[in-house]
Amino acid sequence: KGEVSIVSYKAKKKRKFGENVLFLVTNFIATAKQAQGTCPESPSVLDATCTEDADCPVGNPVVRGIKTGKCVMFNNTHSTCEIYGWCPVENNTLPRKPLLAEAENFTLFIKNTVHFTKFNFSKCNTLQTNDPTYFKSCTYDPFFNPSCPVFRVRDMVEAAGETFGDLALLGGSIGVRIEWDCDLDHPAAQCQPQYSFSLQDRRYNFRTASYYWDSQRRLFRNLLKLYGIRFDISVHGQAGKFSIIPAAVSFGTGIAFFGAATVVCDLVLLYLDAKADFYWKEKFEEAKPPKGKTEAAA
């Protein structure tokens, strides 16, 4: 049983999706001041290009709206079907480089508390300190700072086998695994988590919009297509402690098992093996009465 809380220092561009999940924006495409009306569909959309009105049946739906039945000029080189929807249509020009490239230097503070109810034992992955600035200045290191779970985003991406620049352009998903393996016969200080990172997906994005009215009460929206890195954090753990009763039960079970194994082996060799007669003679010795007693009886 574990609890995880996520705090982001210097990372204002973040979005929390659910429990133990964090999304960090690294790139985006903006389409500003859209309003409901008519406009030409983008030529990149399937079935949007046309040469005459007959190519645009009225009422047929496309990706961003409904066809009005007109074929209009999109630009100097393309003609597309006019649609009714949010206009102008969504911009789909992706920047060549991540717009938020500095996000690689953001840090994530991942606080995790694990509780083993059977042993009434709890442990936190953070250092117990009275210094309020400690976690703002330290960075995780498995050898020198194992109790400082402040991770630099670039280090997490590289630990997953990727480069930040490549993943930040189109987004991606990284799994963060916190593993507890505690021997409670040892001091509690030796119960420390191990962190591992894995790449789950090389593309990740979603759309979001903010709606507003102008001074004439007309409805508008600003559409954003956000690319970024999603961090999925999972906690796994096990703990053990020596107890004389389970040890005695296991020892007795082992002895009983070896006794039963001997009986089974004898049955196989005596009745199922091809050389059962030889084994029978070696295992059992036929007892004969002494000669003196035999003659006296005669």
Image: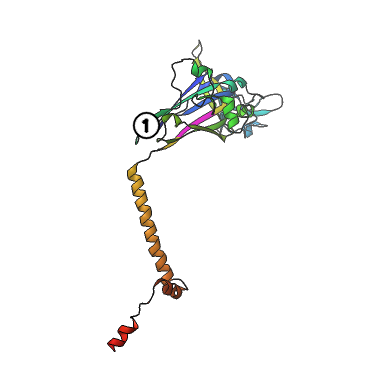
Q: How crowded is mark 1: few (under 14 residues within 10 Å), some or many (20 or more)?
A: few
Q: Position of residue 24 (x, y in %)?
A: 54, 24
> Which of these two is toward me, 252 or 43?
252
Please indicate, yes or no, whether residue 70 appears anywhere in the rendered image. no
**Residue at 41% over, 73% down:** 280
Find the residue positioned furthest to the bottom.
298
Q: What stretch is highlighted in magenta?
A: 230-235
> Which of these two is toward me, 225 or 78?
225
SS category of the residue bearing label 1: strand
Quarter-wise, where is residue 58 in the image? Answer: top right
| Amino acid type, label 1 | Phe
Where is mark 1, residue-wise?
121
- Kindly report the secondary structure that dominates the magenta region of the rendered protein: strand
Q: Position of residue 134 (x, y in %)?
A: 49, 17
> Which of these two is toward me, 237 or 78?
237
Quarter of the image with the N terminus in it: top left
**Residue at 31% over, 87% down:** 295
Magenta run includes residue 155: no
Quarter-wise, where is residue 38 in the image? Answer: top right
Q: Is residue 220 above or below residue 197?
A: above
187 on left or right of 226:
left
